[in-house]
Amino acid sequence: MRSARAFLAALCLGVPAAAQAQDAAPRRVVSINLCTDQLAMMLAAPGQLHSVSMLATDPRSSAMVEEAQAYDINHALAEEVWLMQPDLVLAGQYSSLAAVAMLRRLGVRVAQIAPANSLEEVRDHIAEVGTLLHREAKAEALTAQFDADLAALRAPAGDARPRAALYYANGYTTGDQTLAGQILAAAGFANVAAEAGFPYGGPMPLELLAMAEPDALITSRAYPGGSRSEEILEHPVVERLRDAVPGAIMSDADWICGTPKVLGAMKKLTDMRERMRPAQ
């Protein structure tokens, strides 16, 4: 009750909850976004990161479930975050906007990180979060390892490029100007979505998918329970394609966030392309 009264008093008065000069390393960091959760867990100094969002513990969306067990969990609510007394909150550009606005009104420093739409932006976000945490050396080392691993996985320029279709719930597809599309291209595939006029993404009619006749089909992993949006992945057209061409099933955890963990998705696709090579 006393903590709740303190929060309400601070909200009314606009009292800074955990103000700290930006030229000093934050000592108590709270992340309220799945992607900043993972970047912070990779980069933070021991004891620097206090809390990550509940999504970090969900294996359907998070690539770092085990690591997340070491931190307090939050639900991206301004009240609970303020009571943690952070001197830095990491948030996404579009998520929890009401909480971000309230925390800033309370004087809490909040940094919003945009979603990554390319492999280059993965590097940018590592550097950005590394700077916010005053962990530039760690960020440089992580980026160097990412670059080396990416180079090892990237398909040679002269290799044949099988045509692959990305197809998710509601018939959604993603094109070359997306993170998933760039991972697909780096793994050595041509993207059917780009051919069909979806450079960024959008719902692709089943007729277009069928007429495209892709060499490979990559679909999303269904969530538990029933979902009308996912029923399209069981449509006879999709099922026939699955039976006719090589495929892979990706979960959100594979590539929803722009972190070095996306290289796991790239490895999966690279291995699939290697299996598609004609026998010598």
Image (cartoon, helix red, strand yellow):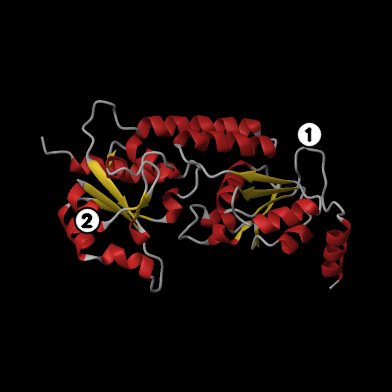
* Picture quadrant where residue 52 is located: bottom right
Question: Which residue type carries mark 2?
Answer: Glu
Q: Quadrant of the C terminus?
A: top left
As measured in the structure, the alpha-carbon distance from the residue carrying label 2 to the one carrying label 1 is: 56 Å
Q: Residues within 10 Å of mark 2 (few under 14, many from 20)?
A: few
Which numbered disc covers residue 158?
Answer: none
Q: In what element is the residue under mark 2?
A: helix
Q: Secondary structure at mark 1?
A: loop
Tell me which numbered mark, 2 or 1, is placed earlier along the sequence: 1
Label at residue 23: 1
Amino acid at the residue labelled 1: Asp
96 versus 123 height, above or below: below
The residue located at (34%, 32%) in the rendering is: 154
x and y percentages locating residue 234 in the rendered image: 26, 66
Quadrant of the rendering where the N terminus is positioned: bottom right
Residue 255: % across, % down: 43, 48
Q: Nearer the viewer, residue 112 or 158?
A: 112
Badges 2 and 1: C-beta atoms under 8 Å apart? no
The residue shown at (82%, 43%) is 20
| Residue indicated by mark 2 | 207
Q: Residue at x 33, y 58 (%)?
A: 171
Residue found farthest to the left:
280
Q: Position of residue 258 (x, y in %)?
A: 50, 43
Lateral position of residue 170 relative to residue 6, left or right = left
